[in-house]
């Protein structure tokens, strides 16, 4: 299984691969599209990315994470294209030996993805008489 995926495919939230020997904790962050952006209702968000750069940055993050935080498993999927409100747009799954390090790493990956990976979002606002 790859460490990351940029895809228009829905995020499979119920999938749980088996644990490897030595893994004792898994933390998942599942981010969903809120129905409100800047106080206005939205139907969803249109995500875009420069895929070659985004994939390079994700690979670099995973490499940095393993180098600086020790051995662990990680999987990051970020949706591209239109994602409707209340649907998942990102999942980060981290597996480690212990729970504290899994929580810390999951938070670290989320912060790094949001600040370093070139994925852009464009909210699709709902107007009083329908969608825009």
Image: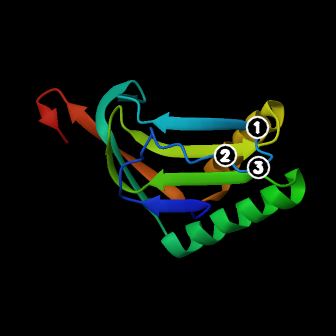
Looking at the image, residue 65 sits to the left or right of residue 49; the answer is right
Residue position for label 3: 21
Q: Nearer the viewer, residue 49 or 102?
A: 102
Residue 99, image x, y percentages: 78, 31
Residue 20, image x, y percentages: 71, 50
> Residue 118, can we see it?
no
Identify the element where label 1 is drawn.
loop
Residue position for label 2: 19
Residue position for label 1: 24
Q: Quadrant of the N terminus?
A: bottom right
The reply to whether discs 2 and 1 touch (Cβ–Cβ < 8 Å) is yes
Snapshot quadrant of residue 55: bottom right
Nearer-N-terminus badge (2/1)? 2
The reply to whether discs 3 and 2 touch (Cβ–Cβ < 8 Å) is yes
Q: Nearer the viewer, residue 80 or 1?
A: 1
Residue 4, image x, y percentages: 58, 60
Q: CA distance from mark 2 to mark 1?
A: 8 Å
Q: Residues within 10 Å of mark 2 (few under 14, many from 20)?
A: few
Residue positioned 35% across, 56% down in the render: 9
Q: Residues within 10 Å of mark 1 (few under 14, many from 20)?
A: few
Snapshot quadrant of residue 71: bottom right
Q: Quadrant of the C terminus?
A: top left
Q: CA distance from mark 3 to mark 2?
A: 7 Å
Residue positioned 76% across, 44% down in the render: 23
Looking at the image, residue 33 sits to the left or right of residue 78; the answer is left
């Amino acid at each position: 299984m790859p460490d990351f995926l940029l895809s228009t495919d829905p995020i499979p939230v119920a999938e749980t691969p088996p644990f490897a020997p030595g893994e004792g904790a898994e933390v998942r962050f599942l981010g969903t599209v809120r129905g409100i952006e800047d106080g206005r209702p939205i139907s969803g968000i249109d995500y875009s990315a420069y895929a070659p750069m985004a994939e390079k940055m994700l690979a670099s993050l995973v490499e940095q994470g393993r180098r600086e935080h020790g051995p662990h498993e990680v999987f990051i999927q970020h949706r591209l294209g239109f994602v409707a409100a209340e649907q998942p747009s990102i999942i980060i799954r981290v597996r480690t030996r212990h729970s504290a390090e899994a929580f810390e790493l999951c938070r670290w990956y989320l912060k790094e993805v949001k600040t370093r990976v070139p994925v852009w979002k464009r909210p699709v606002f709902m107007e009083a008489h329908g969608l825009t």
